[in-house]
Image (tube, rainbow, N blue to C red):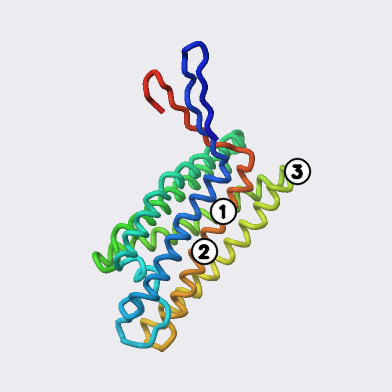
Amino acid sequence: MLQSSNILGHERPLVIRVSFATCVLATVCLPLLGLITCVFISSVFHFEDATGTHCQVPNYLPSISASISLSPECHIWRFCIGLHSAPRLLVAFTYFKFYKARFATRFPESLLSCLNLGFSISENLGLLLLTYVSSTETYFVHKEGFVLFIVSSLIYMLITCRLWKSIKKYSLSPEDAKSHHWKVRFLLLNVCFCAFAGFFYWKHNMYCESGSYTFFALFEYLVVFSNMAFHLTAVWDFKSREVMLISSSEDKDF
């Protein structure tokens, strides 16, 4: 929503209002649509390159790393993640301010709030690292970025569920209870999908069985989708909040 007017020759600042729920939805949809697009293009136009394995066994799904390493897929993915990263940090610091205000007099939760922010930032950094350093360029760096993303996201989700357990305990809002309910379930799903993905990745590397890498790719998708669903619960947490941009016509600043 835009607001601006001219009163007695003085132009009022331009105010842009966007609901926080819309901001969160856009932040989650960017990597979601980017991933779906990359996997689709890889499966249709670059199937052999995207599904090839080191031991030449049949594979029917491209992994995420393979999908975002080819062209034009890598450019689409980098564009989406580039747009996604700044709003993601905005959401992280909004949560931090929310927790600090909520747990101002409670040391354990206040400390967890700081750790939560740290792991949220490291999760974002891991995502940027695995995005802008593809597996075909520098595999070790890409792999470390992926590990940083997975480990940080799991710890972040675990701490978040612990904080919302405390919030639910002292809150009468049904939205807070619903948010905690779904956060816990998405965390459990994410842990299960990570375990299955790790198992099939190990099985593929140890035995080179046909189909193992396909199941790894499938559960890798589910890990990412459950992670996105977890972050989408911010829609309930900040339902009434707005993001505001104010432009001053006098100094041309935001």
Q: Is residue 69 above or below residue 165?
A: below
Q: Secondary structure at mark 2?
A: helix
Residue under pointer 2: 225
Residue at screen point 47% across, 12% down: 9
Q: CA distance from mark 3 to mark 1?
A: 22 Å
Task: Verify CB contact (< 8 Å) between mark 2 and mark 3.
Answer: no
Mark 3 is surrounded, within 10 Å at the Cα level, by few (under 14), some (14 to 19) or many (20 or more) other residues, namely few
Q: Nearest the camera: 42 or 182?
A: 42
For the N terminus, the quadrant is top right
Q: Is residue 89 above or below residue 47?
A: above
Residue under pointer 1: 232
* Mark nearer the N terminus (2 vs 1): 2
Residue at screen point 44% across, 46% down: 118
Estimate the x, y position of residue 156 in percent, counting from the top left.
50, 53
* Mark nearer the N terminus (3 vs 1): 3
Amino acid type at mark 2: Phe
Q: For the residues carrying marks 3 and 1, which lies nearer the camera in this image? A: 1
Estimate the x, y position of residue 176 in percent, counting from the top left.
68, 47
Q: Secondary structure at mark 1?
A: helix
Q: CA distance from mark 2 to mark 1?
A: 10 Å
Estimate the x, y position of residue 121 in percent, counting from the top left.
42, 48
Residue at screen point 62% across, 45% down: 237
Q: Quadrant of residue 145?
A: bottom left
* Mark nearer the N terminus (2 vs 3): 3
Task: Verify CB contact (< 8 Å) between mark 2 and mark 1.
Answer: no
Residue under pointer 3: 172
Amino acid type at mark 1: Leu
Q: CA distance from mark 2 to mark 3?
A: 30 Å
Q: Nearest the camera: 181 or 53?
A: 53
